Amino acid sequence: MDRMAAMQAFIYVVETGSFSSAARRLGIGQPAVSKIIAQLEQNLSVRLLIRSTRGLTPTEAGRAFYEGSKRSVDEANEAEVAARGAGAGLSGRLRVCAAVTFASLHVLPHLGTFLEQNPALEIDIVLDDRNVDLVEEGIDVALRMGVLADSALTARKIAEGRRRIMATPSYLQRVGVPESPAELIHHQAIVYSQAGGGSSWTLKKEGEDQVIDVNGRVRVSAAQGVRAAVLADLGIAMASEWMFLPELENGSVVTVLDDWRLPDIDLWAVFPAGRLVSSKTRAFVDFVTSLMLGHPSANQRGLDG
């Protein structure tokens, strides 16, 4: 096996955490993959992997070799794409990370179109509301919402969406419709405990700001839990229209205090710092951008950032 193929095998081992999973990706036997890694370690005179209860994890040298291998393989793939021409389509594997609810509602239902356009492409979608380590997880691009905490990240702003105060009609019929932000303290708030959530809600109107510390017996760490709690009539929530778009359209969830404005939420495509952004990554981000530009709950602009 040539050096480029050996580097690809090592990349798969790091990304999957096992020889057997890497072997399945490569279409070869597990012993062959183990031999490839052993030869790499012998040639480099350094240990690249450590066995643990979690599987195979890279050493510090292994992490550095993974990053260098990833860049080399990506650059080779880009050269191949350029040689074949744009009409040949994209190939290989793309790893995307996105929040569970957003991806389930707004990306996965439309993914078939992108896959039909690129029949040689495979996509791994890692669903997680947390900001995972892109390098450690082998992610090519992450779709993240809100304010980016790390200014060193390479990112492109895709869209802006509205946050609203919302609940089910049955909950509001039982508890009452708040007529002012101050009345929110009399409601059970569904509190989203990730970044961008919390129990302090800021509403603005004609230059006036009101910060309301809401009360709630239910706190959830995933947006899907906010959806489930609201749909179960457990309370009122501050959330993006993206999170409840199907229910807002069919009337099973409604918004309140519509004359007050909450901070908009940004959707970003985030890339691992220092790594080549491949053609397939750019194509996927362009595809998501086109989806959001036609989205009824997003401001009609895609932005570079």
Image (spheres, rainbow, N blue to C red):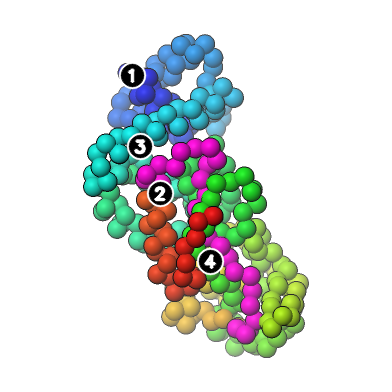
Question: What residue does disc 3 label?
Answer: 78
Q: Nearer the viewer, residue 179 or 81?
A: 81
Q: Quadrant of residue 184?
A: bottom right
Residue type indicated by callout 4: Glu
Instruction: Classify 10 Å Cα crowding around label 3: few (below 14), some (14-19), many (20 and above).
Output: some
Looking at the image, tell me whether mark 2 or mark 4 is earlier in sequence order.
4
Q: Position of residue 194 (x, y in %)?
A: 64, 58
* Residue 17 visible within the image: yes
Query: Is 210 inside the magenta-drawn segment?
Result: no
Looking at the image, tell me whether mark 3 or mark 2 is earlier in sequence order.
3
Residue type indicated by callout 1: Asp
| Dot label at residue 282 | 2
Between circles 1 and 2, the one closer to the viewer is: 2
| Contact between labelled residues 4 and 2, with CB atoms less than 8 Å apart | no
Instruction: Classify 10 Å Cα crowding around label 1: few (below 14), some (14-19), many (20 and above).
Output: few
Q: Position of residue 247 (x, y in %)?
A: 47, 76
The CA span between labels 4 and 3 is: 31 Å
Instruction: Classify 10 Å Cα crowding around label 4: few (below 14), some (14-19), many (20 and above).
Output: many
Q: Position of residue 235 (x, y in %)?
A: 63, 75
Looking at the image, tell me whether mark 1 or mark 2 is earlier in sequence order.
1
